[in-house]
């Protein structure tokens, strides 16, 4: 049975979605970053269904989404001063904080860790759903584990449409890459995953942050595995914006171009341009949808132009390197 796709503007939709969450069901919903696959954060059985549907390993924790401060107190048992500074500056928004967890959060949600990853999304549909459900919502991205994240309701339907209860359609996600994740449980703040809240912005509020290793065996937050956000088609990242690959004979190749400059190369069977003017925010917003379109072209390989690794470019290149990993 296919999941129902409900428009967020339909008056009955939010009531049905909230009821589905309360009853232990799974609802895909938009946030400003990507679409999430949500369940009641306190329901271990519902969380188990999320892991099963996504084929997600249970050592990879979920992010808990909240709508207000009272819900944060139910999820996290301590709030360092640095956490309050970041909350004041960036919540609601695409920033996830790793904090000591309350015992009421099931171990499955946190992969057995004594910490919880939590954020307050800045998307009206996500906020309304959390309030209607009356509970924090645990939600990874609404796709099969390891594949390119979904930024539209149709992306969700293409991957999980036969295995979940509802898809809540709130239009394309405006940011397009997953949230920045900062851990505040160690001796110093640590950037675990770059996102649209940049390292420079964070440092301006709380001072220097340590950057975690790009690859870990035991994730403390989502998005830390070597290969992730990956297409089925092999991906090669070019050495520079001006570099051009030597294509093998009869190789059917695609190009993910950062800007318009390379879009006229006729050697490629398919070309996607992230931003005609080379704007990093536009590039991030288009990244996952462009990768999905190229992946659907039956290509032998996708070549990718790198973008400047500054600001939001750090998050874009993080996703591309994991996509290209063997």
Image (cartoon, grey):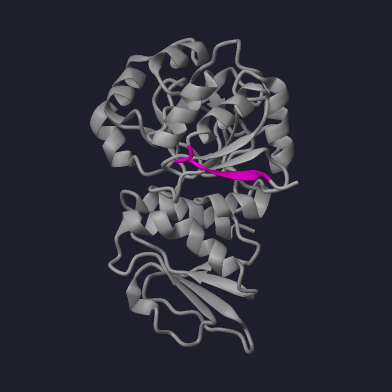
Q: List x then y, in percent, for residue 102.
A: 55, 11
Identify the residue at horizontal 60%, vertical 25% (top origin): 19
Report whether 83 appears left or right of 235: left
Q: List x then y, in percent, for residue 177.
A: 45, 48
Q: List x then y, in percent, for residue 61.
A: 61, 30
Identify the residue at horizontal 49%, vertical 10% (top origin): 77
The quadrant of the image that shows the C terminus is: bottom right
Residues 260 and 25: in front is 25
Residues 239 and 35: in front is 35
Report whether 228 appears left or right of 288: right
Identify the residue at horizontal 33%, vertical 53% (top origin): 281
Q: Give the magenta range.
A: 3-10
Please say whether residue 7 is one of the residues in the magenta stretch.
Answer: yes
Quarter of the image holding residue 233? bottom right
Identify the residue at horizontal 31%, vertical 52% (top origin): 310
Report whether 69 appears left or right of 156: left
**Would you place residue 265 above or below residue 308 in this image?**
below
């Amino acid at each position: 049975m296919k999941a129902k796709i409900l428009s967020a503007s339909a008056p009955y939709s939010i009531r049905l979605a909230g009821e589905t969450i309360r009853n232990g069901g799974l609802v895909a919903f938009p946030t400003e970053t990507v679409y999430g696959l949500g369940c009641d954060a306190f329901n271990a059985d519902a969380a188990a269904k999320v892991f099963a549907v996504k084929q997600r390993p249970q050592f990879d924790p979920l992010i808990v989404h909240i709508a207000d401060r009272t819900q944060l107190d139910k999820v996290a048992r301590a709030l360092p001063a640095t956490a309050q500074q970041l909350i004041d500056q960036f919540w609601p928004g695409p920033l996830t904080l790793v904090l000591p967890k309350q015992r009421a959060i099931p171990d499955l949600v946190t992969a057995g860790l004594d910490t919880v990853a939590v954020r307050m999304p800045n998307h009206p549909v996500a906020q309304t759903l959390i309030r209607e459900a009356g509970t924090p919502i645990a939600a990874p991205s609404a796709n099969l584990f390891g594949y390119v994240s979904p930024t539209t309701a149709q992306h969700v339907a293409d991957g999980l449409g036969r295995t979940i209860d509802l898809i809540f359609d709130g239009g394309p996600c405006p940011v397009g890459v997953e949230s920045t994740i900062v851990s505040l449980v160690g001796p110093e703040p640590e950037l675990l995953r770059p996102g649209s809240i940049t390292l420079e912005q964070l440092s301006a509020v709380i001072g220097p942050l340590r950057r975690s290793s790009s690859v870990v065996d035991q994730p403390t937050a989502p998005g830390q595995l070597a290969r992730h956000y990956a297409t089925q088609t092999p991906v090669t990242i070019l050495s520079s914006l001006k570099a051009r690959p030597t294509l093998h004979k009869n190789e059917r190749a695609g190009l993910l171009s950062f800007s318009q400059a390379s879009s006229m190369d006729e050697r490629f069977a398919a070309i996607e341009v992230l931003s005609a003017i080379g704007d990093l925010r536009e590039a991030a917003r288009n990244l996952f949808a462009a990768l999905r379109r190229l992946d659907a072209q039956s290509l032998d390989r996708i070549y990718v132009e790198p973008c400047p690794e500054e600001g939001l470019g750090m998050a874009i290149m993080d996703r591309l390197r994991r996509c290209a990993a063997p």
